[in-house]
């Protein structure tokens, strides 16, 4: 698979079980487009994400109180939330307009990873604007 030729900054997210985490990201709408057995490059929803196999000992991802998080910025918030409704963090992560101006949802990922998916509220069709 060729390495994408896009510009930007991309999160590199460690997972304790990299192959086991891939089905989660595919369910979220991402597709593996590159990498090797220890490093995956994914694309979806106009975003690129890199996953890596975490190490052992101090390099292992703490599954309780995981400090890592990913924010996916896309207008397709509703479509993604519908794919993973059972993973939405309740009560606080439910899909809604937030006071900081984002329409977003919070979901629980592999290894206790926090994933937020959002788009500016003012740009959502519910706000009277075209998507």
Image (spheres, helix red, strand yellow):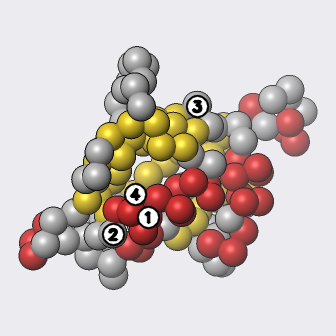
Q: Residue at x 90, y 33 (%)?
A: 128
In three-dimensional space, the C-alpha distance between marks 1 and 4, rounded to whole angstroms, equals 15 Å
> In the image, is 129 to the left or to the right of 46?
right
Residue for badge 3: 46
Indicate whether 44 appears above or below 80: above
| N-term-proximal mark, 2 vs 3 | 2
In three-dimensional space, the C-alpha distance between marks 2 and 4, rounded to whole angstroms, equals 17 Å
Where residue 23 appears, x then y in whole percent?
A: 53, 62
Q: Residues within 10 Å of mark 3 (few under 14, many from 20)?
A: few
Task: Please identify, in this view, whether the residue under mark 4 or under mark 3 is nearer the observer.
Answer: 3
Residue for badge 2: 17
| N-term-proximal mark, 4 vs 3 | 3
Indicate whether 86 appears above or below 69: below
Residue for badge 1: 21
Task: Please tell me whether mark 4 sits on a helix, a strand or a loop.
Answer: strand
Where residue 84 appears, x then y in whole percent?
A: 68, 65
In three-dimensional space, the C-alpha distance between marks 2 and 1, rounded to whole angstroms, equals 6 Å
Q: Which mark is residue 83?
A: none
Q: Residue at x 70, y 37 (%)?
A: 75
Residue for badge 4: 69
Task: Please tell me whether mark 2 sits on a helix, a strand or a loop.
Answer: loop
Q: Residue at x 56, y 46 (%)?
A: 30
Q: Residues within 10 Å of mark 4 (few under 14, many from 20)?
A: some
| N-term-proximal mark, 1 vs 3 | 1
Indicate whether 69 appears above or below 16: above
Task: Please tell me whether mark 1 sits on a helix, a strand or a loop.
Answer: helix
């Amino acid at each position: 698979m060729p390495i994408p030729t896009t510009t930007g900054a991309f999160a590199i997210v460690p997972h304790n079980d990299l192959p086991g985490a891939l089905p989660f990201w595919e369910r979220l709408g991402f597709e593996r487009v590159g990498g090797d057995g220890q490093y995956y490059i994914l694309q979806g929803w106009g975003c690129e994400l890199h996953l890596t196999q975490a190490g052992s000992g101090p390099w292992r991802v703490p599954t309780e109180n995981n400090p890592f998080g990913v924010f996916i910025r896309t207008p397709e918030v509703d479509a993604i939330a519908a794919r993973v409704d059972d993973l939405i963090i309740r009560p606080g992560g439910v899909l809604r307009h937030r006071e900081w101006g984002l329409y977003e949802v919070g979901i629980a990922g592999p290894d206790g990873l926090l994933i937020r998916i959002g788009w500016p509220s003012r740009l959502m069709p519910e706000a009277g604007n075209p998507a």
